[in-house]
Image (cartoon, rainbow, N blue to C red):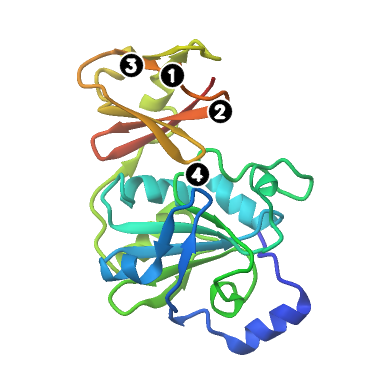
Amino acid sequence: MKRTLLPVTVLAFSMNAMAQFGTAPDFTVTDINSASHNLYTWLNAGKVVVVDASATWCGPCWSLHQSHALENLYNNYGPNGTDQLRILFYEADASTTMADLQGLTGGSQGDWLTGTSYPVVNEAPLTLAGSVGWPLGFPTVSLIRPSDKEIVEDMWNFSYAQMVNSINQIITLQAVGVAEEGSLLSSVSLYPVPVADVLNVDLSAANGAIDNIATDATGRVVGNVTVGNDVQVRMNVADYQAGVYFVSLRAGNTVLGTKEFVK
């Protein structure tokens, strides 16, 4: 997989600056859900910060997105996990539209929003400078250390395990894991699909290992059910708008993965 470079004139400026590693300048941005995020507030709170500077038309960016490495990181170590890091997706092409992010245009690689639980920023003009945020092209995945606000790694082509290893050089991540495909996740069934009012979640084959279920639509948590010892869970989705949703499954501190359903 090869990184997508910026136009030649911009790339030449970025390479001269070579500011990818060094102190990260502070910024405040607003995501597509109108929530504000300040880099130094996160860092001063001791959170490791990962900024993914990508573009919807970028092939290598899409490959990274499809690997779900950042999503797994956020699920495990973000606010709903061990709460040790923050991740921000920064759309670095100011001409990008919401339709591009939704994968509804020919120039976009696909749907970037469905199933993405960390904040997505799409703005014009851009707040972040390319000379720092993506000096060598897209994607650039900056790992920022809270102790001195330094950009210490570009994880653009890292696997999930490699990302975890790099973050462990900064802080000790608490023990969590992602279940292997074909294990408990495959034994959980959802029905009926599509669903109108009540979604049934069958956990009988999981032997009571699932602790809770959280439904998620386009990165927004819309429901949360604690399962306990139940093997059949009924989720009221009557008020959900029509669309694709995801059920996130956890067993203790282990994120098992997601199941999709359609309303």
Could you tell me how far apart the alpha carbons at marks 4 and 3 are, in whole angstroms? Answer: 24 Å
Residue that appears at 71% across and 79% down = 10
Could you tell me how far apart the alpha carbons at marks 2 and 1 are, in whole angstroms? Answer: 12 Å
The three-letter code of the residue at mark 3 reads: Leu
Tell me the residue that label 4 is attached to.
116
Q: Residue furthest bottom?
A: 16
The picture places residue 143, in percent across and down from the top left corner, at 42, 68
Determine the secondary structure under disc 3.
loop
Q: Are marks 3 and 1 in contact (CB under 8 Å)?
A: no
Quadrant of the image containing the C terminus: top right
Could you tell me how far apart the alpha carbons at marks 3 and 1 are, in whole angstroms? Answer: 18 Å
Q: Earlier in the sequence, mark 4 or mark 2?
A: 4
Mark 4 against mark 1, which lies toward the viewer?
A: 1
Image mark for residue 237: 1
Q: Earlier in the sequence, mark 4 or mark 1?
A: 4
Determine the secondary structure under disc 4.
loop
Left or right of 175 in this view: 9: right
Asked if residue 206 is positioned above or below residue 13 in the image, the reply reads: above
Q: Residue furthest front?
A: 34
Tell me the residue that label 3 is attached to.
203
Label 4 neighbour load within 10 Å: few <14, some 14-19, many 20+ = many
Q: Earlier in the sequence, mark 2 or mark 3?
A: 3
Asked if residue 198 is positioned above or below residue 78 in the image, the reply reads: above
Residue that appears at 50% across and 55% down = 31
The three-letter code of the residue at mark 2 reads: Val
Tell me the residue that label 2 is attached to.
244
Image mark for residue 213: none
Left or right of 168 in this view: 133: right
The picture places residue 62, in percent across and down from the top left corner, at 63, 51
